[in-house]
Amino acid sequence: MQEDLRVVFESRNRQSCADRALVLSASGIPHQLIDDGLTAVLVVPAEHSARAIEELRLYDDENPPLRPKKQNRVVYQDALPGVVAYFLVVCAIAWLAGYSIFGHDWYAAGRVDGALIRGGEWWRTITALTLHADARHLVGNLVFGVLFGVFAGRLLGSGVAWLAIVVAAATGNAVNTLLLESAHRSIGASTAVFAALGLVAGFVWRGQLMAQDRWSYRYGPIVGGLALLMYTGTGGENTDIGAHLLGFVCGFGTGMLLIALGPVPTDRRAQLVAGCVALMLVATAWIVALRV
């Protein structure tokens, strides 16, 4: 190569120089890659420098540098009011049902009963969420309900999160009842627990709240949610796997729907109203159940 050489590209990234060397080779331009261990440079004879620079410019125009997609900013909300309300409501109804307060059999009045729900007793899809077979069942749903409720409340705010959870869980119970035989019966907040998990997964995934540049990040919320569902929601001979799965699915769909509807209101008044509506749904369902 001639002595009169011109630098047409310089970088600390040797691969960048190697890529551009291929461009010059494809264009038939004589060149040399010089690497001193710190910086790599491409040099060409002086008479070819103008053409080499133009070829590299065209290459750069066609191959802009990859820039990581800007991640949506998450403003975390106060999840404490929602999980405290969940804890108190579930414990209070467990006590009321355990002592048959008001002279009613709360379990018979509020459990999921396929035949009765199909006959129009819609409130059972909600009341069943607050009933538990024993102390172990109650404690398990309290622990996981608080855990997943914190995640949902941090993202959506206490009021909106728990309203979405109640609606999604009730829908999951209703769909599960329609898919199973009419004699199907069940109780427990686990459907709501997995609705909360699905809500978080759907909201994070559809809202692209995690980095999207790699498939493992892009589908991370879905994979993580399903993994937790499989780990915590499919064990035990009395486990209603269908209710858990449909709770997760309905929660996931609700999370995506909230993204589609626009920004979730984060002001205190909106959260308070949503929280009150969630409590009213539970209270109304029980009032109707105990009067029938």
Image (tube, rainbow, N blue to C red):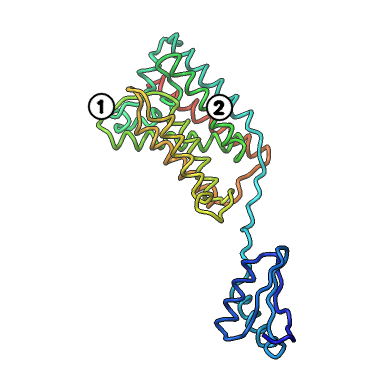
Please report the residue visible at 70 percent of the width from the left and 75 percent of the height from the top. 9
Verify CB contact (< 8 Å) between mark 1 and mark 2.
no
Q: Amino acid at mark 2?
A: Val
Please report the residue visible at 55 percent of the width from the left and 82 percent of the height from the top. 26
Secondary structure under tag 2 reads: helix
Secondary structure under tag 1 reads: loop
Residue 146 numbered tag: 2
Q: Position of residue 289 (x, y in %)?
A: 40, 23
State the quadrant of the N terminus: bottom right
For label 1, count other residues whose C-alpha is less than 10 Å away and answer few (under 14), some (14-19) or many (20+). few
Q: Amino acid at mark 1?
A: Ala
Q: Nearer the viewer, mark 1 or mark 2?
A: 2
Instruction: State which tag comes first along the sequence, 1 or 2.
Output: 2
Which residue corresponds to mark 1? 183
Q: Quadrant of residue 153?
A: top right
Q: Position of residue 177 (x, y in %)?
A: 32, 33
Relative to 31, residue 111 above or below: above
Q: Would residue 137 be found to the left or right of residue 63 on screen?
A: left
